[in-house]
Image (spheres, grey):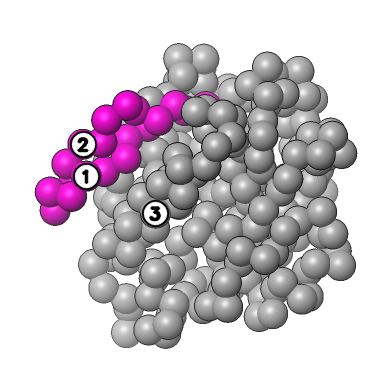
Amino acid sequence: MSLLTIIVTEDYNIRDPELTETGHAQVQELRANLINHPVAQNAGLIVTSPMIRTMQTAMGSLDWLIDSGVKIEADAGWQENSAKPCDTGKPGAAVALAPKFPAVDFSTLGPVYPDKITPAGSHYFCTRKAIMNRGQASLRRLRDRPEKVIIVVSHSGFLRLGVSGCFYLNADYRIFDFEDEEQPGEDGAPQIRLRQWDETKEKGGGMGKSWKEMVELGSGLPSELPN
C-alpha cells in the first residue's frame, strides 16, 4: 500500500482557520501536480483531518478524484498536535461543517472531537506519548484497509513528530509504503514503520519545497500537559 501525505498552511491565532489567498493558490499548484501523478491517480480513499484548512485543501486539490467517486473521510486522528486555537476544531464540527463540505464523510469523526484537554480527549493530548500513540493508531487503521493507495491530508507537526519524521512545508507531499514487518518501539511494543519513496525523499517532497532533514519521532514534545 502507498500512503501519500499532504501538508497545508497554518494560522496560529484563529480557531480552526480557513486557508489564506496564498494557501488557495498553493492548493491549485498542488492540484496541477497531483492530477498528473500516477500514484494519486490510483488512490482509492482520501482521509483528511477534520479541520477546515485541511478539508479545503482536500477539496481543492483532489476534487477530480472525489468527482470520480473516491470516498473522502474525516478522521480526528490526523488533526494537528497542539491545543492552540489554530490547531483546535470547532465544537459540533460534523453538524456545522457538513453543509460546507458535503462530500466529506463525518460519520467516523467520533463524539470527542475537538476535545484535546480533558480526560475524555486524552488520545489527542499534545504529549509525546499521546502523539506517538495516535500516529501508530492512525497508521494501523490505514494499513488494515483494503485500498492500495490512500491519500492523507494532515498537518506538518503531527506528520513530522507522530508519523514519519519528515518535514513538510505548505502544500507539499511525500509518498510512503508500509514496511513489511513491524519493529519494536521504545516500550518494546511492535511499531508500524514507513519507507519513503526516493522520488519525494531525494528532492524534499513531491513539490520539492520541504527540508530533507529527518527528526526523531516525538522529539521535543512535552511529557505532560502544561498547567
Look at the picture and state if 217 lies above or below 95.
Answer: above
Could you classify mark 1 by the number of other residues whose Cα lies within 10 Å: few (under 14), some (14-19), or many (20 or more)?
few
Q: Mark 1 points at which residue?
A: 190
Give residue 109's position: percent from left, percent from top: 61, 66
Q: Name the residue under label 2.
A: 183
Q: Name the residue under label 3.
A: 137
Give residue 33's position: percent from left, percent from top: 73, 23
Residue 131 sits in quarter: bottom left
Check residue 135 for magenta coloring: no
Give residue 175's position: percent from left, percent from top: 52, 27
Check residue 185 for magenta coloring: yes
Could you classify mark 2 by the number of other residues whose Cα lies within 10 Å: few (under 14), some (14-19), or many (20 or more)?
few
- Tags 2 and 1 touching, CB below 8 Å: yes
Q: What residue type is labelled 1?
A: Pro
Looking at the rendered structure, the secondary structure element under dot 3 is: helix
Looking at the rendered structure, the secondary structure element under dot 1 is: strand
**Magenta segment boundaries in residue numbering:** 173-194
Task: Say if residue 151 shows up in the picture.
Answer: yes
Q: In the rendered structure, which disc, 2 or 1, sits on the residue that comes first in sequence?
A: 2
CA separation in Å, label 2 and label 1:
5 Å
Q: Nearer the viewer, residue 192 or 199?
A: 192
